[in-house]
Image (cartoon, grey):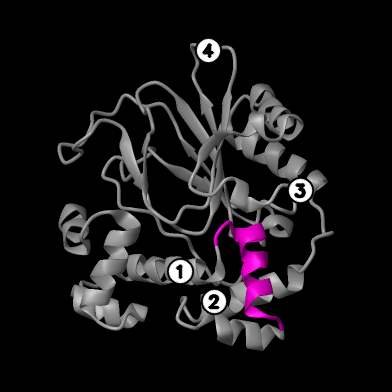
Amino acid sequence: MNQPLYIPVQAHSPYMSISGRYCEWKPSHKLRKYIYCYWVSPFTNHPKPECQLTDNIEMIVPDGCIDMVFRIDRTLPDIQNLVVGTTDRAIFVDMEYDRIDTFGIRFYPGGLQPFIKEPSYLFTNQIINFEDVIKGFSSELKEQLYLSPSFNNTVYSINKYLLSKLSNDLGWEDTFQNALMHIYQANGNLSVKEIARKEVISEKQLTRIFYERAGVGTKTFLRIMRLQQLLTILHGREKTTLTDAAIQSGYYDQAHCIREFQDFCGILPSDYIKFRN
């Protein structure tokens, strides 16, 4: 299969880099338009890395995706089902590695709507109990985890269940997917006006579609994709200066890059690079 146009990047984590600490599975081909991966962070007795400043806390940076997360505490009878909405700023999450297993579904931007009717903006910048929003869908997903003896079986069962729920009855689907393609190909470096002209639609209507499907407006989504391109370069094997990475990512200059990075992540990019190294 061809390389996807967009690969979401998350903040570097010394803890998640430990072998067996984090694993991903790809969905079936029919779902790869909507789901980036299934992932698991299992309970572990690994000692915390010395560079981990705060127990179990991970920074989640904006990537345009929505994650559905199942927290499995073996001491409790129920599974907690959360939805982590699209964010336009970094959030910090206690993963509780030493107490629970975590199973997640990472939906591409706009990828949740083929399975539910609710718009993505209901979840933006929030971590909420999914059962409070869509009880039946949440309960049926949790049932797949209850019945599965292993995470491999869970992936198979949930993949099969989501295929049965997949709906192709989505308004403005072609326009939205085409807009995403333009944005991914340009790594976020084009204007809302350019996208609207390509798709023969008003800028206002395009922004409404993005709020409905991606949870944020088109302009914010473009900024998130530019940040993602910067993180992709910073995480690459080749060493690069912040100035070069900023230029390659489409920022006007290093100062522009620093302002955007601080706005999204709350820290200086130089501090992030130092922590990562």
Distance, label 2 to label 3, CA atoms, is 25 Å
Distance, label 4 to label 1, CA atoms, is 39 Å
Numbered tag placed on residue 76 in the rendering: 4
Q: Is residue 77 above or below residue 27?
A: above
| Mark 4 or mark 1, earlier in chain | 4
* In this view, the mark in front (2 or 3): 3
Residue 115 position in % (x across, y down): 74, 48
* In this view, the mark in front (4 or 2): 2
Distance, label 2 to label 1, CA atoms, is 8 Å
Residue matched to label 1: 225
State the image quarter where residue 2 is shown.
bottom right
* In this view, the mark in front (4 or 1): 1
Distance, label 4 to label 2, CA atoms, is 43 Å
| Mark 3 or mark 4, earlier in chain | 4
Single out the residue that lies furthest toward the right.
169
| Mark 2 surroundings: few (<14), some (14-19) or many (≥20) residues within 10 A | many
Residue 177 position in % (x across, y down): 68, 71
Extent of the magenta region: 201-216
Numbered tag placed on residue 183 in the rendering: 2
Residues at circles 2 and 1 in contact by the CB criterion of under 8 Å: yes
Numbered tag placed on residue 236 in the rendering: none
One can see residue 235 in this view: no
| Mark 1 surroundings: few (<14), some (14-19) or many (≥20) residues within 10 A | many
Looking at numbered disc 1 in the image, what kind of residue is underneath it? Met
Quarter of the rendering occupied by the N terminus? bottom right
Main SS of the magenta segment?
helix
Tell me the element at label 3. Answer: loop
Residue at the image point whose x is 18% and y is 52% from the top: 275
In the image, residue 25 lies in the stretch drawn in magenta: no
Residue matched to label 3: 117
Tell me the element at label 1. Answer: helix
Q: Is residue 72 above or below residue 118?
A: above
